[in-house]
Image (cartoon, rainbow, N blue to C red):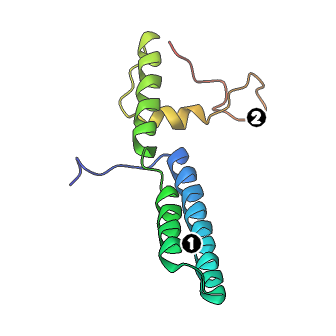
Amino acid sequence: MVLTSRTSSHLQTVIMRIVRIIVALDLLLAAVVIAYTLLTGGFRSEVLAFVAVLLLASVPVALPATFALATALGSLELTKQSILVTRLSAIEEAACISTSSRPRRSALVGTLSGR
């Protein structure tokens, strides 16, 4: 069980939140289209096909593959700089860290290095 558990990165969480919003908007749009069709007495089979395509298009199928490819390429670039990456989600988390040379901001800022 421990070998199969995964933590979701911050980027993955944000994108999944956006996907949920898009799916909710598509469901609302599908409900509006169906309601309009029922009120006007239009072609129901064509509208159902349109609603099916609308809902299927809102689900991003290639999203997990895109995450994996981006983090693998980032890991490859880091290994060229002699940095060992043990967890691919760590690349995304490290990319969110802003570094600065000003000492007032934080004790951890400016302490990361690629050596």
For residue 52, above or below residue 34: above
Q: Is residue 61 above or below residue 95?
A: below
Q: Where residue 56 appears, x then y in whole percent?
A: 46, 60
Tell me the residue at 44%/49% (across/down).
Answer: 8
Q: Disc 2 marks which residue?
A: 105
Provide the secondary structure element on which disc 2 rests.
loop
Give whichever of discs 1 and 2 has the lower sequence position: 1
Mark 1 residue type: Leu
Residue at 51 percent of width and 79 percent of height: 44
- Cα distance in 3D space between marks 1 and 2: 44 Å
Q: Quadrant of residue 64?
A: top left
Q: Position of residue 84 (x, y in %)?
A: 38, 20
Label 2: few (<14), some (14–19) or many (≥20) C-alpha neighbours in 10 Å? few
- Tell which of 21 and 26 is nearer to you: 26
Mark 1 Cα within 10 Å, few/some/many (few <14, many 20+)? some
Q: Are marks 1 and 2 in contact (CB under 8 Å)?
A: no
Q: What amino acid type should be assigned to the residue bearing mark 2?
A: Arg
Tell me the quadrant of the picture where the N terminus can be found: bottom left
Identify the residue at horizontal 55%, vertical 78% (top origin). 43
From the top left corner, tell me how far across and down residue 27 is, in percent: 56, 72
Is residue 77 rendered to the left or right of residue 26? left
The numbered dot on residue 94 is none
Q: Choose between 27 and 13: the one closer to the eye.
A: 27
Residue occupied by mark 1: 27
Residue 65 appears at what percent x and percent y?
A: 40, 39
Q: Report the number of numbered marks.
A: 2
